[in-house]
Amino acid sequence: MDDDDFVLRLGIHLLNSLACQVEGEQKTIVGNLGAIEKMLNLIESRYNRNLCDEVMETAWSTMWNVTGKF
């Protein structure tokens, strides 16, 4: 694992943790700041490389947590 991959994994886990800890309007703010688009880009990139890994799974989880029930 190189440094860029480590930083990517760390960033996604932090964003996912944040999405789990906020509610209501705060989830909307996270979404409005571009979290969903970034996660979709990560998923698309992994999909195009036929790579299903921790990054892809956490990106899905993050989107679920951002768009989850308020």
Image: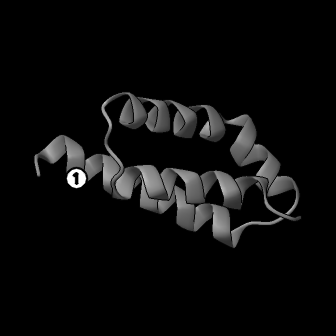
Q: Residue at x 44, y 61 (%)?
A: 13
Tell me: 11 left or right of 23.
Answer: left
Q: Quadrant of residue 54?
A: bottom left
Q: Residue at x 46, y 57 (%)?
A: 57
Where is residue 2 shown, x and y percent of the image? 10, 46
Left or right: 22 as drawn, with respect to 55:
right
Q: Residue furthest bottom?
A: 21
Furthest residue to the front? 50
Number of numbered discs overlaid on the protein picture: 1
Q: Quadrant of residue 32?
A: top right
At x 46%, y 61%, the residue is 14
From the viewer's perspective, is residue 17 above or below residue 3? below
Q: Classify 18 as above or below 50.
A: below
* x 47%, y 31%: residue: 44
Q: Is residue 34 above or below residue 8?
A: above
Direction from residue 65 to residue 3 in the image, left or right:
left
| Residue for badge 1 | 6
> What is the residue that sits farthest to the left in this orientation?
2
Quarter the C terminus occupies: bottom right
- As shown in the figure, which amino acid type bears the numbered disc 1? Phe
Circle 1 crowding by C-alpha within 10 Å: few under 14, some 14–19, many from 20: few
Q: Is residue 55 left or right of residue 35?
A: left
Q: How is the image coloured?
A: one colour
Percent across and percent down for residue 51 are 31, 43
Of residues 49 and 1, the one nearer the viewer is 49
In percent of width and height, residue 40 lies at 56, 35
Q: Secondary structure at mark 1?
A: helix
